[in-house]
Image: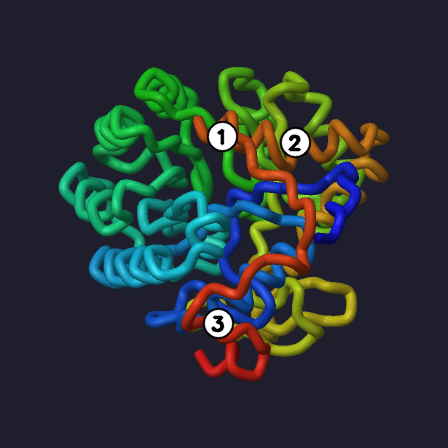
Amino acid sequence: MSSPAPVFPGDGLFDLQVNGFAGVDFQQDHVSPAALEHALRGLRAHRTSRILYTLITDRIDALCRRLEHVENLRRRSPLARDTIAGYHLEGPWLLPEPGYHGAHDPALMRAPTVADADRLLAASGGHLRLVTLAPELPGAPEVIAHLVSRGVRVAIGHSNASEPDLDRAISAGLSLCTHLGNAVPARLPRHDNILKRLLARDELTAVFIPDGLHLPPSVLRNFVRAKPRDKVLFTTDCMAAAGAPPGRHTLRHVVTEVGPDGVVREPGKPNFAGSSLTLDRAVDNISRFLGWPLDDASAACSVLVASSLGLHPPPVLASHSTEPEPAGFASTASTALRA
Ligand SMILES: [Zn+2]
């Protein structure tokens, strides 16, 4: 029997926004069992033992279909069950205005309803953990309260909510900010803008993407300083390009290109379309950009993520190589990518 591998800061990381990994796009229908396991093994190779499997804006029917499909895969795969702690829905309840919708299709955005929320909850097998929405949309406070009563955390993102909108949403249970500082227009009014409104709200836990690209290091430092220290988390918001060589990948129907600089863009457009960051690299970046000890950087990418979602901490990865192969699942990349 081999002795356990040494534990080092950053083991057992928890990423709350993973749109795809290692060439596998989670936004596609019918991700194959082998493709899913390939992506999850890739995440584990980057010390990420738990994720929220993230789906972006689409029709409610399509989202329900994908949730039911992944739930089926989870039932058949111990690796998927262990790694996928639940789902994060980022859309379709977002602001469809230029500068705010990002890489999401604004034509598919809509106002939230309790009926749609219930359909998505049912399709997720009760494993919906986080919803990102724009709280200024009609009906949002009622849906936020409904989701929170079902144990789902709700984050603001892709939004231009006013102060009264924020008051109502926080009263209803809004608790997080998704990728704060991104999904906003390149030019904003100097003082009265959504970034300043959100940075001033100590009630809300901010989630940042520490790739040095979505937020330059100096901006990240300023934003983190504006928040209570225990209200800061990090995510990669990564897509299929993460853990894969530079090249073309998809995010739903959007073809993206990743250059050697790691920037994910729609060809010909300036805005980012997800990231190629891995969470182990994120821990190093946080330490470098903010001067945080590695243990603190790791905590904001692991145990604090879990506690903010009301979940148990992610397990420590004692070894990446001795995991038993689940029956019926191939793990080679060539098989996996036949999705
Ligand atoms: Zn987003």
Residue type indicated by callout 1 = His
Q: Position of residue 172 (x, y in %)?
A: 31, 20
Q: Quote the CA–CA distance across marks 2 and 3.
A: 29 Å
Which is in the foreground here, disc 1 or disc 2? 1
Secondary structure under badge 3?
helix
For the C terminus, the image quarter is: bottom left
For the residues labelled 3 and 1, say whether their Cβ atoms are less than 8 Å apart: no
Q: Residue at x 44, y 63 (%)?
A: 26
Q: Quote the CA–CA distance across marks 1 and 2.
A: 14 Å
Secondary structure under badge 1?
loop
Q: Could you classify mark 1 by the number of other residues whose Cα lies within 10 Å: few (under 14), some (14-19), or many (20 or more)? A: few
Q: Residue at x 62, y 62 (%)?
A: 42
Q: Position of residue 220 (x, y in %)?
A: 73, 36
Q: Nearer the viewer, residue 188 or 317?
A: 317
* Marking on residue 35: 3
Q: Nearer the viewer, residue 104 or 72?
A: 72
Residue 76 is left or right of residue 256, and the answer is left
Residue with the mark numbered 1: 312
Which is in the foreground here, disc 2 or disc 3? 3
Q: Of marks 1 and 2, which one's residue comes earlier in the chain?
A: 2
**Looking at the image, what colour scheme do you see?**
rainbow
| Extreme-left residue of the structure | 115
Q: Visible in this render: residue 144? A: yes
Q: Visible in this render: residue 277? A: no
Q: Quote the CA–CA distance across marks 3 and 1.
A: 27 Å
Residue type indicated by callout 2 = Ala
Residue with the mark numbered 2: 300
Q: Of marks 2 and 3, which one's residue comes earlier in the chain?
A: 3
Q: Residue at x 30, y 63 (%)?
A: 69
Residue 132, quarter of picture = top left
Q: Of marks 3 and 1, which one's residue comes earlier in the chain?
A: 3
